[in-house]
Amino acid sequence: MRYFLITIMSLVSFNSFSQENITEIDPNIERSEKIQDLINRIEDNRKQLNSIDNQRLNKFINQVGERKALLAKAKKLLADEEARNTRLEKTFEDNENRLSELETELQLKLGVLGELFGVARQMAGELQGDTESAYNFTEFPDRSKKLKYIGQKKVHNLDDLETLWILHLNEIASSGQIKEIEANIINRKGDLESAKLVRYGPFNIINSNEFLKTDIPNNAFKALAKQPERSITKQFKSHYKSSGYAVAPIDPTRGFLLSLYLDKPSTLERIAQGKLIGFIIVTIGILGLIFGAYRYYSLFIYANSLKSKTADDVFSKISKLSEKHSNIEIFERECDEILLKVNGNLNWGVNWIKFLAAVAPLLGLLGTVIGMIETFQAITVFGTGDPKQMAGGISQALVTTMLGLIFAAPLLAMYTSLSEKVSDILQEIEEYVALTIVKKVN
């Protein structure tokens, strides 16, 4: 109990002590202190900014003299350039007047020579144009540079005219030469290599029976992508071996006619122009001809077997029937059966050849119709201004008609030949039967 009372008394004394020590803070005083602190901070910032502005102002004032000096220098340079511009304009006008006077004086002094120099420039330009694609450009490497110089010069001296004269003489001399030269060529792999070439004047240049064309940027020659047929190129080999005159093909247009000749489509390319119908006609025609040849060969073998009088041929069968049947009517009926069977075997496949001979031109007509439809469609889309757009349809129309007629004629001939062969064999058998019947009657 005593301890409890002591504890209560201690708490009461502590509470009274705390209430005495805690004092309340006035809100007005706290707000005044914050405002004063803000004012102090603003004053400090203002002093710092004023100090920075004063430093910048002092620096600018100190540099005013330097800026004035630069401005004065710029004004002096502007005045000097304006004075220089005035002097140059005057000099330009004086030069123009002087140039006009000199040109007039030059024209007066040239007189008739002006026409001569004009002709020289024209001849140099023409020869320069030919030189750019000439086959002898490797033999005269400096010719192009000299011609360009002469073609640009207004007044030529004697050396220029002599140079032009010599260059023309060299061109004339080289145009009549068949000469073996050594030059660079670009092979099929695209590599540059040295080779011995044969130049036929200004018309052709050959490497191992191949036509070449110039490649001026690489200072070399390269083979044409497509060569003429062997009947043309092999003439060069005979010309090499000949010790006298021999025939050799040349292109007098220096490559133009040869390019047109090489653009001519080959047989396969021409068939390809017929597209699907063209390939169908070719397939049918080839298969028909092969089958016709097979049937003709089999009939030929059968005809030879009849002539050999073997035991298994139809003549032996007819002879056995003649011995077996004494009645002529029964014998004739048996022979008719044999003839029908032989006729069926002999005519097997012959009518198919006739069918193919009739189908080939019909397919050609179908290709013609399809080609004309494509042509009219091209005209509808592109008009008639560009013939190349219509060339594909017209080519198909003509090529398919051509292929149909080409294969129809031999197929029809094959059918006629087979029919005659079958008729001959049947006639021979019928004659044998008739002869047998006559013998039985007698």
Image (tube, rainbow, N blue to C red):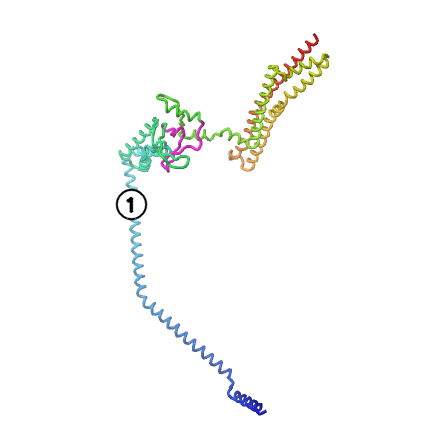
Side of 328 where 10 appears, left or right: left
Side of 104 where 332 appears, left or right: right
Residue 50 in picture, x, y percent from top left:
38, 73
Q: Residues within 10 Å of mark 1 (few under 14, many from 20)?
A: few
Most extreme residue toward the top, as rendered? 442
- Kind of element beneath mark 1: helix
Magenta stretch holds residue 242: no
Residue at horizontal 37 percent and vertical 73 percent from the top = 51
Q: Is residue 258 above or below residue 106?
A: above
Q: Determine which quarter of the picture holds residue 42.
A: bottom left
Side of 20 where 117 appears, left or right: left
Q: Is residue 413 visible?
A: no
Residue 192 in picture, x, y percent from top left:
37, 36
Q: Which range of residues does the magenta coloring cover?
A: 201-229
Residue 75 in picture, x, y percent from top left:
31, 59
Residue at horizontal 67 percent and vertical 14 percent from the top = 320
Looking at the rendered structure, the kind of residue marked 1 is: Asn
Q: Is residue 432 visible?
A: yes
How many numbered marks appear? Answer: 1
Q: Is residue 76 above or below residue 371?
A: below
Q: Nearer the viewer, residue 383 or 115?
A: 383
Q: Quadrant of the C terminus?
A: top right
Q: Nearer the viewer, residue 210 or 4?
A: 4
Q: Nearer the viewer, residue 74 or 353?
A: 353
Residue at horizontal 30 percent and vertical 47 percent from the top = 92
Q: Is residue 126 above or below residue 319?
A: below
Magenta stretch holds residue 203: yes
| Residue position marked by numbered label 1 in the rendering | 95
Q: Quadrant of the N terminus?
A: bottom right
Q: Determine which quarter of the picture holds residue 191.
A: top left
Q: Nearer the viewer, residue 149 or 309?
A: 309
